[in-house]
């Protein structure tokens, strides 16, 4: 099972950052929360810091743990470890990996297509945020 550090990044307006998976990747075209796979010997918080820098070109601080979600796909089994994350220089975000990034309210997430594992995260966000 692969462990994935998943970041919930909220701006001053209460909107959450999502990114669209690029062509050529598994689940291409679907929307997701920033983050990525934990590397060997890396803590989950260090994973999130690294992934946010690689994906968005900004530094972040990992906050509180929110939930975990496990899901099996044809390309592997994944456990998403979801944390609230604060980004420094939020206005300087760059889409280095995603083909598009957007700020959306939890209620508007129903208008975007996400991978199955993210549906449980969205339900949590719509209830708690």
Image: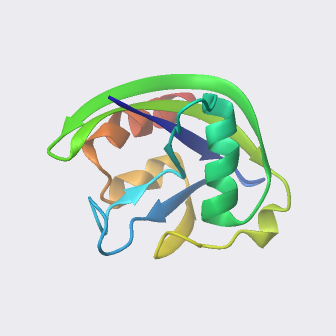
Nearest the viewer among 114 and 76 is 76
Q: Is residue 1 visible?
A: yes
Measuring 66% from the left and 35% from the top, which residue is drawn there? 84
The residue furthest front is: 41
- The percent position of residue 20, horizontal first and vertical second, equals 42, 66
Measuring 62% from the left and 23% from the top, which residue is drawn there? 65
- The percent position of residue 74, horizontal first and vertical second, equals 14, 45
Q: Locate residue 28 relative to residue 84 in the image: left or right.
A: left
Q: Is residue 15 visible?
A: no
Nearest the viewer among 101 and 13 is 101
- The percent position of residue 38, horizontal first and vertical second, equals 52, 38
For the C terminus, the quadrant is top right
The residue furthest right is: 89
Q: Locate residue 27 relative to residue 101 in the image: left or right.
A: left
In the image, residue 54 sits, relative to residue 63, either above or below, namely below
Measuring 31% from the left and 38% from the top, which residue is drawn there? 117
Q: Locate residue 124 relative to residue 14 in the image: left or right.
A: left
For the N terminus, the quadrant is top left
In the image, residue 115 sits, relative to residue 66, either above or below, namely below
Measuring 29% from the left and 66% from the top, which residue is drawn there? 28
Colour mode of the rendering: rainbow
Q: Tally the numbered discs.
A: 0
- The percent position of residue 109, horizontal first and vertical second, equals 42, 53
Nearest the viewer among 113 and 72 is 72
């Amino acid at each position: 099972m692969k462990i994935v550090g998943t970041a919930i990044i909220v701006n001053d307006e209460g909107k959450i950052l999502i990114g669209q998976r690029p062509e050529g990747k598994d689940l291409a075209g679907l929307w997701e929360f920033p983050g990525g796979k934990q590397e060997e010997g890396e803590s989950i918080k260090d994973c999130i810091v690294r992934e946010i820098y690689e994906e968005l070109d900004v530094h972040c601080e990992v906050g509180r743990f929110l939930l975990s979600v496990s899901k099996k796909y044809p390309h592997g089994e994944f456990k998403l470890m979801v944390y609230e994350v604060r980004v420094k220089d939020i206005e300087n975000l760059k889409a280095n990996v995603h083909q598009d990034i957007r700020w959306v309210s939890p209620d508007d997430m129903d208008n975007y297509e996400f991978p199955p594992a993210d549906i449980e995260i969205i339900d949590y966000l719509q209830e708690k945020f």
